[in-house]
Amino acid sequence: MDILDCSKPSDYDRAKELKSFDDTKAGVKGLVDAGIVKIPRIFIRPDDELAEELTTHQSNFQVPIVDLDGIRGDRTWGLFQVVNHGIPLDVLEKMLDGARKFHDLDLEVKKELYSRDPKRNIRFYSNIDLYQSRTANWRDTFAISKLASKPFDPTEIPEVCRDSSMEYIKNVSKLGNTLFELLSMALGLKPQHLKEMGCTEGFYIGCHYYPPCPAPDLTLGTTKHSDPSFLTILSQDQIGGLQVFHENQWVDVHPIAGGLVINIGDFLQVISNNKFKSVDHRVVANGSVSRISVPCFFAGHATETPKLYGPIKELTSEENPPVYRDFLISEYLSSLFSGAVGDKSVLYQFKELVHESNNHQNDLQVPLIDLGGKHEEIVDQVRSASETWGFFQVVNHGIPLNVFEGMIEGVGKFHEQDVEVKKEWYTRDVKRKVTFNSNFDLYRSKAANWRDTLSFSMSASENFDLQLLPAALRDAATEYAENVRKLGDTLFELLSEALGLKPDHLKALECAGKCTFVCHYYPACPQPKLTMGASSHSDPSFLTVLLQDHVGGLQVLHENQWADAPPIPGALVVNIISNDKFKSNVHRVLPSRKSRVSAICFFAGRFAPPARLYGPIKELISEENPAKYKEVQVSEYVGRFYSKGLHEKPSPADYRL
């Protein structure tokens, strides 16, 4: 077996190394058995994650321990340990021993079960997200799956761990029923409620093996994640390494002899309407000994039975409306397997598709700035809005109302033309000056947005042929572009002063070097609660100026709440991106049963050669406030943006030093 050498960064080919590792079918243990002394680069965590360890791991918390002879539960953690649970100690020990015996089998025997097909009942693999993750985890897995209605054949389980596995499955299933009864009562429901919903149907057991690691400080056994289940019951050996994220700290879950770890999964958080919380947890690598753990995930009706799950009706009311939409477990799993463990929670993506009432409060007011006021006061208002929101609306900006009306009307006219006329501009080639398409990330997004788009770009260094624009909005777009570029100059001056710089500082950096105009059309949607007009994202620009019609739907995420940015006649929405002094804000658009039009101008900096590097402004950094980001070319950032889906686009965090 070849040992992968990543000592020369210039020789690093991640895709090649991933395939080389996967093709061995030997897993992480195969690397250790081969005598590796340095871990391959695919396992080494990003620098920002490693640095974070210095501030997030404290040990002054104790994970709750619950005696099932008198359970009351603890909703603040989402994870606890149980004793007196009814499973004999020898059953737990034999299961852990059987799992270890499997992983200690000869490689050629294990290879027969090596597979990345999640539909197989019995399989062996290393890293379920090997090709999607930023870094691989130091872990191999032997998995046993049982779907709710599909017959399960015990003879498929390798003989070395067959009897111990079947005995454990019988016992852990009984414990699962007990726990679901207790959880039902803790929610104020009848004892059988969760069981009758099918929460106990179907399970997935992962027999994890964490080999000793030559560099445990550089990798993880399991990346931070929450579980794709209603409930997870975990048996672990006495080595330790499991941690739970609680109050912004990593807390050790110390093994208890005969104890089991119980944690709430994403699905239970959904159906409890956030009354119970699904907790983030991880496993740290160990430098001296191997570790075994056996989690059992109760996942309900996964693929074979199309059953919808959503907030339990008895737990919702006018005061506590549903936070999530109904969804299929198979839909969740499809989204999970298309991404990486440790990515933004898949649960959050489903929550994002909902118009969250309890996370959307109308008492938040997006800042409104009158550009006709006193200059010093305007600068102060821009500074405050940029530091706290990264988002504001402006009035008295100098652009005539009839220019707005003409642009909105022109965008609507283009999109409402006969499709054969619009097809002339339909393309996915981002190099075209004028493009029309639906969803630039159509083939990469987890769910398409309810939106069509006409785009055109203008650079300060080159003449734009206006005849390239569709006739339906040519005159209106020309006049609007001229006016909004002038406003951009004014806004960059105000932002420069708000940063304590000379008024022309940002302009001298050519922040307005390229303008991309994006004309969105959101058709009337028959089921607006099931989709999004634009998924939550931040903008790949220095400054964004947005014109919207009267329909509304734009929201900005502020203090973990979605705040409406309601249309104000004659107003423009401004969204900004400084060494973290000003914030780039996350926003989205909700669809409606009415059609909606918006026209956006992205000021994206110098694009054309000679290339220009952008990084923290030197005047804004010091020994007390060092540079937080590396320099980057706009073309490189935008290239990454278009190579991903809107939901997973690059962010400033990707460029942290």
Image (cartoon, rainbow, N blue to C red):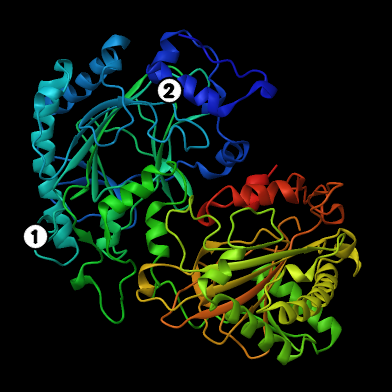
Q: Identify the amino acid type marked 2.
A: Asp
The C terminus - image quarter: top right
Mark 2 and mark 1: Cα distance apart in space: 45 Å
Where residue 622 sits in the image (x, y, percent)? 83, 50
Residue designated by label 2: 22
The residue at 38%/74% (across/down) is 528
Q: Is residue 520 above or below residue 250?
A: below
Q: Nearer the viewer, residue 646 or 222?
A: 646
Name above or below for residue 174 compared with residue 373. Answer: above
Q: Which badge, 2 or 1, comes first in the chain's sequence?
A: 2
* Left or right for 557, reference 479: left
Mark 1 sits on what residue? 191
Q: Measured along the vertical axis of the image, is residue 2 above or below residue 657? A: above
Q: Can residue 628 be seen in this view?
A: no
Residue 645 location (% of width, % of height): 52, 52
Q: How many labels does the image show?
A: 2
